[in-house]
Amino acid sequence: MANWGTDRDVIQTAHQWLQEGHALVLVTVLKTWGSSPRPPGSLLVMRPDGVHVGSVSGGCVEEDLLARYRQNELSDLPVRLDYGVDRQEATRFGLPCGGRLELLLEQLIDPDQLQPLLSAMEQDELVARRVDLTGDAVSLGPASADQAFSYTDEAISKVFGPQWQMLLIGAGHLSQYVSQLALMLDYRVIVCDPREEYAAGWQVPGARLIGMMPDEAVGEYTGHPRSIVLALTHDPKLDDMALLEALGSEAFYVGAIGSQRNCDARRRRLRELGLSRAQIQRLHAPVGLDIGSHTPPEIALAILAEITALRNAATAVVRNPDAVNVV
């Protein structure tokens, strides 16, 4: 069994395997050079029988690590390893030309080693796991949303928990699909809907449902540079309240559902309500990439694709003025 796995997947699986009596090795990408497939901080946990979850490369490095583990070549842990230190080795391990990885391997033998970290993640807390590379001590401490993975000769520090927060206005059908995708992408998801009939049908574990008014929810839960606000009700009384607050905040992304005609009318309303032209230009509406989406799952995919592209700054997002969201 193998899959890429989120940090939470890796830690939950490792904890379960330790409870079952397996010895494990936790592998962390410390540093990359060139076009390495996985970024620093990526995780892999592996058992001696070859079962593993997570990823540190495209697959070939994992195969070599597992082979060395089965052959007892990784007994003196913790240890740092280099892969792809020259062109020939980079090609052998499936790394792009010139690619190189530096990895940290740690031995895990007791579920108590991961229980505090797992408990913090289950509470959606942001924590930094620090490994002292001079004395091998491991500690947990509070972390901030903008804290990045760090690696020096003395220690590494990796943040666990949702560093990005998404507030959805409306607990309708579309919000369920957006929530599910966002949770897979490790967002903290909060769904705001004061309408009892919608709140009663909410069924997405892991996404917190609140019943306050949308403008209050924006003020309470978002506004920092790592927050996302999506107005998804089709009801101007609710969506516009949230947008008025969100477009004047530091939120990274503010979007709203609707056809182009409805979105143009919304922009006029927001202008009449006092928002500046610059604030209104921040609004992504119709929300999401234009992929010809019509069903709720397709629209959710388009929304998360656009946010991901902007977050990664990897793609120039070209918007189609004729795009329409249909639910």
Image (cartoon, helix red, strand yellow):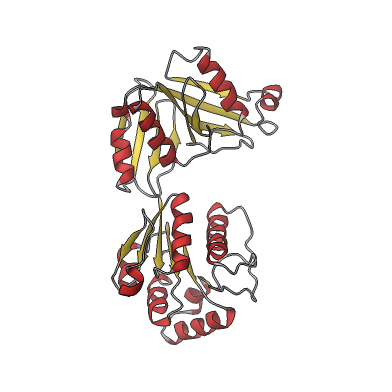
**Residue 252 appears anywhere in the view:** no
Q: Nearer the viewer, residue 128 or 124?
A: 124
Q: Is residue 82 left or right of residue 221?
A: right
Could you say where residue 81 lies in the image, as x and y percent from the top left? 53, 21
Could you say where residue 29 lies in the image, as x and y percent from the top left? 50, 32
* Residue 11, above or below 133: below
Q: Nearer the viewer, residue 87 or 181?
A: 181
Seen at 70% across and 32% down, the residue is 97
Residue 113 lies in quadrant: top left
Seen at 67% across and 22% down, the residue is 89
Q: Nearer the viewer, residue 174 or 96?
A: 174
Q: Nearer the viewer, residue 109 or 27?
A: 109
Seen at 35% across and 39% down, the residue is 128
Number of labels in the image equals 0
* Residue 227, above or below 106: below
* Residue 220, above or below 136: below
Could you say where residue 70 lies in the image, as x and y percent from the top left? 52, 16
Residue 222 lies in quadrant: bottom left
**Residue 259 appears anywhere in the view:** yes
Could you say where residue 298 lies in the image, as x and y percent from the top left? 57, 63
